[in-house]
């Protein structure tokens, strides 16, 4: 996962279009979003975020920086996926307390 901040939304849009075309990305592989939370004022900046093959990340980073973006996150996608393990050991939120799927609870 790589994410970059663009002050110029039009530049971010052009960069995304170029990356989608050049790298034959699917519609879910990269996208744009306003930078900031719903309760924060925005200065018009946007973030371009996407999943790119590891072999292409360095070239994508150079292109984004040359297009006016500043890379703010570059994380191996393996770190963003849920950890493997039995589903019954994962706690879940049940009202006011954490419970394991076997019925136990954590305060």
Image (cartoon, rainbow, N blue to C red):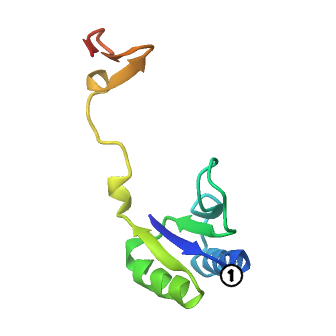
> With respect to residue 52, does 18 lie above or below?
below
Furthest toward the bottom, the residue is 66
- The residue under label 1 is 11
Say whether residue 90 is left or right of residue 65.
left
Q: Where is residue 44 in the image (x, y as percent from the top left)?
A: 69, 68
The residue lying at 57 percent from left, 77 percent from top is 23
The image quadrant where one finds the C terminus is top left
Looking at the image, residue 23 lies above or below residue 89: below
Q: Residue at x 44, y 79 (%)?
A: 56
**Which residue is most to the top?**
103
Task: State which quarter of the image contains the N terminus.
Answer: bottom left
Q: How many labels does the image show?
A: 1
Q: Is residue 72 left or right of residue 69?
A: left
Q: Nearer the viewer, residue 16 or 69?
A: 69
| 4 sits left or right of 105 in the view | right
Q: Which residue is drawn at 63% across and 77% down?
A: 7
């Amino acid at each position: 996962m790589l994410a970059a901040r663009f002050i110029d939304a039009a530049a971010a849009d052009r960069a995304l279009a170029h990356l989608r075309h050049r790298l034959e990305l699917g519609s879910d592989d990269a996208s744009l979003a306003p930078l900031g939370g719903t309760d924060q004022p925005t200065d018009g900046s946007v973030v371009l975020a996407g999943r790119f093959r590891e072999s292409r990340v360095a070239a994508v980073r150079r292109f984004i920086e040359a297009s006016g973006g500043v890379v703010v996150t570059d994380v191996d996608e393996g770190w963003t996926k849920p950890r493997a393990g039995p589903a019954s050991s994962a706690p879940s939120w049940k009202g006011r307390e954490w419970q394991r799927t076997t019925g136990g609870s954590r305060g």
